[in-house]
Amino acid sequence: MFYDITPEELTAIAAYADGTGPLPGGDAVTKFNALHAAFSKKLLKDLASANGKTKRLETRVSSLKKKEDERTAAGIFAETVPGLDSLDVAKALVYCLLQKRTYQMTKAKVIAILYEMYASWLVSKHERLFSHHPQASPYGPQFWRVYNKIDIKYAQYEDFKSLAEKSPAIAAFTKNAAEKYYDWSIKKICSGWMKSKPYLNASPTSNDGKWGKEISDAEIYEWRLIQNNKK
């Protein structure tokens, strides 16, 4: 009923509210009260929803802040937040590289780019790009899951789409990495690694003569920051 209130009735109600006119007759006031009640109910519902979302967001921020404070108190990388499966990211990266007809497409190049991505993500997000750390090997930083299972000659759009559904930010980051490194030689990508502190500290000379030690996130972070400041 209240939806058929006329402009004339609204004008009369406004005049009465301002003290410049008499109380409107007929159904004008009834219609207006019904309209006001409906709007008030909708407004209260919207406000309640907004307050609920705000409280949930505040709780989430508080939880993240607490975890961040705990990590900072223990050393920022004491419990670095883990990311995705390295193989999922690697498949998406191979797909993007194949679209670019990349130069010198090898497993070593794919893994070298992944390590560059790992270091950059660590600096920008303070979390691991993957659910596991890179390890030292005779051939440079290694992600064994990728090395053992990746197919560098074949990848499909579904690999990239699947990553984008899990994390649009990491999918975009992966595409940008392919754009940056597709025409780099493996030597150019790896320059500086073999003499870097994180790699040397994970190599046999610092690990009882054994390969395979995880490379320190804290040291990767420090190394990459120094590299970035030199640019």
Image (spheres, rainbow, N blue to C red):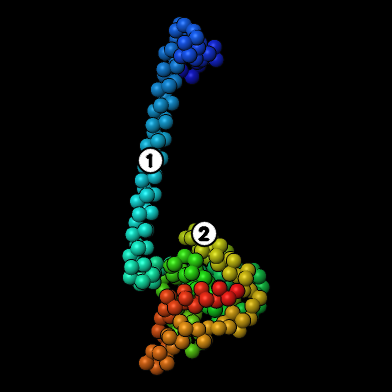
Residue at 37% from the left image edge and 63% from the top image edge: 68
Residue at 63% from the left image edge and 69% from the top image edge: 179
Label 2: which residue?
168
- Give the SS element for disc 1: helix
Numbered-mark total: 2
Q: Position of residue 177 (x, y in %)?
A: 58, 69
Between residues 76 and 204, which one lies in front from this camera angle?
76
Q: Position of residue 214 (x, y in %)?
A: 41, 81
Q: Position of residue 134 (x, y in %)?
A: 45, 78
Q: Position of residue 203 (x, y in %)?
A: 44, 88
Q: Label 2 to label 1, Cα distance in Å?
A: 28 Å
Q: Residues within 10 Å of mark 2 (few under 14, many from 20)?
A: few
Q: Looking at numbered disc 1 in the image, what kind of residue is underneath it?
A: Asn
Side of 200 relative to 66 (left or right)? right
In the rendered view, tell whether residue 219 sits above or below residue 36.
below
Residue at 62% from the left image edge and 81% from the top image edge: 188
Res. 49 visible in picture: yes
Side of 56 relative to 184 (left or right)? left
Say whether disc 2 or disc 1 marks the residue closer to the N-terminus. Answer: 1
Res. 155 visible in picture: no
Label 1: which residue?
51
Image quarter of residue 40: top left
In the rendered view, tell whether residue 170 sits above or below residue 60.
below
* Quadrant in which the N terminus appears: top left
- Give the SS element for disc 2: helix
Q: Residues within 10 Å of mark 1 (few under 14, many from 20)?
A: few
Q: Looking at numbered disc 2 in the image, what kind of residue is underneath it?
A: Pro
Between residues 134 and 157, which one lies in front from this camera angle?
134
* Quadrant in which the C terminus appears: bottom right
Residue at 57% from the left image edge and 64% from the top image edge: 157
Please identify, in this view, whether the residue under mark 2 or under mark 1 is nearer the observer.
1
Between residues 125 and 30, which one lies in front from this camera angle?
125
